[in-house]
């Protein structure tokens, strides 16, 4: 019996994304300061090479990201 491989469209449709939760025992303000400090993202997030944002309602956030095991890009 021959197995039929799913098409790329079928495989993509199965991707639901992912979520994760973590409880951090510090004041919310401290967490907020870290999460909104876009210039320091690459210091603590290995996927982010560069982050830039105008932090305002409707503002645009720019991320340059890649998996840590991939060859490094020069941001």
Image: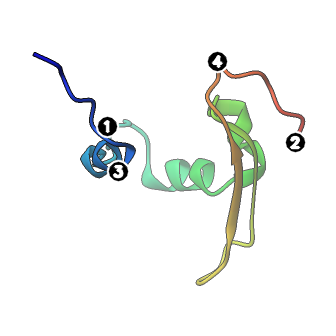
Q: Residues within 10 Å of mark 2 (few under 14, many from 20)?
A: few
Look at mark 1 in the image and give the residue it sits on.
23
The residue drawn where x is 64% and y is 18% is 69
Residue closest to the eye, 48 or 39: 48
Mark 2 vs mark 1: in front:
2
Quarter of the image for the N terminus: give it. top left
**Image position of 22 with respect to 68: above or below:** below
Q: Which residue is mark 2?
A: 75
Mark number displayed over residue 9 = 3
- Of the numbered discs 2 and 3, the one sitting upstream in the chain is 3
Pointer 1 with pointer 3, Cβ within 8 A: no
Asked if labels 4 and 2 touch by Cβ distance under 8 angstroms, the answer is no
Q: Which mark is residue 69?
A: 4
Vertical placement of residue 53 versus 16, above or below: below
Q: Name the N-terminal-most of marks 1 and 3.
A: 3
Q: Residues within 10 Å of mark 4 (few under 14, many from 20)?
A: few
| Distance between mark 2 and mark 1 Cα atoms | 31 Å
């Amino acid at each position: 019996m021959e197995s039929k491989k799913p098409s790329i469209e079928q495989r993509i449709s199965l991707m639901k994304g992912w979520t994760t939760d973590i409880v951090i025992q510090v004041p919310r303000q401290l967490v907020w300061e870290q999460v909104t400090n876009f210039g320091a993202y690459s210091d603590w997030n290995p996927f982010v090479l560069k982050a830039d944002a105008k932090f305002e309602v409707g503002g645009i956030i720019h991320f340059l990201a890649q998996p840590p095991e991939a060859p490094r890009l020069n941001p």
